[in-house]
Image (spheres, grey):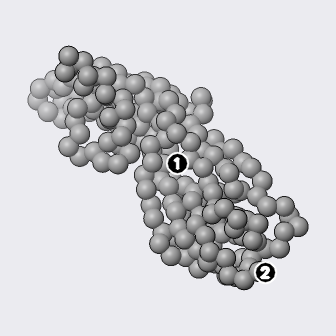
Amino acid sequence: MAVQSHSPAPASAPRCAADSYTWSKVTYRKVLAGVSEPQEVEIPAHGSAKLRLETQPVRDLVARVTAGTVEAGVNPRDAVTSLEEKTGEVLALVGVGNRFRIQKQETHWTMEVLNETAVPDRGRFLHAVVAQEVAATFSAACPGGVVRGTLTTWAEVGMGAEIKCGFTKYLKGATKEAEHRACASERSSQLA
């Protein structure tokens, strides 16, 4: 998964103390980053079938801190390092404005679909790429006083999910969105 980097504040800007960050309200959210078109497949009883799917980007994730905090001395790298220490997560932000987007060479997925029942199964299957977005509020001791803000970045990029169109009982959040996006035309044709 590609990350496009942008530069944070100029190197000469006064910085907040790297060890002064305190964190609260850390939230995690699974975000749909890419989804494939569904592919029809028949899976024999007690068998499997392999699919090769091409995933298309759905959205970019953008790493960011609250507007004005970089100018007030917040160094995004220091903030991320501090949040990594608090959460134990490996986070992606190395500069404000970094973007995560599925790249062309990362769009082809091969998956195996299993059928453990005694009857053949047929359906349309898709692949979803899900990223874990992490957001947290912080305060930091900076040259002009305490600065408060929010840091948003991501971890665990590229988690995959294989989904069967119409089988939505256990889907939620990003996987439910993937099924809805990819299988909507199937639902529309069934209504017609």
Viewer-side residue, 62 vs 170:
62
Find numbered disc 2 in the image and state the secondary structure of the residue it sits on. loop
Q: Quarter holding the C terminus?
A: top left
Q: Is residue 172 above or below residue 10?
A: above
Q: Where residue 60 is drawn, which disc sits there?
A: none
The count of marks equals 2
Amino acid beneath label 1: Val
Drawn side of residue 64 relative to residue 95, left or right: left
Q: Is residue 147 above or below residue 162?
A: below
Q: Nearer the viewer, mark 1 or mark 2?
A: 2
**Percent position of residue 35, x then y:** 43, 33
Drawn side of residue 53 relative to residue 112, left or right: right
**Spatial separation of the CA atoms under disc 1 and disc 2:** 35 Å
Asked if residue 17 can be seen in this view, the reply is no
Asked if residue 105 can be seen in this view, the reply is yes
- Tell me which corner region of the image, top left, top right, bottom left or bottom right, holds residue 181: top left
Which residue, given by chain and number where applicable, does mark 2 sit on? 143
Q: Which numbered disc flags the more N-terminal residue, 1 or 2? A: 2
What residue is drawn where x is 48% and y is 69%? 26
- Tell me which corner region of the image, top left, top right, bottom left or bottom right, holds residue 144: bottom right
Which residue, given by chain and number where applicable, does mark 1 sit on? 157
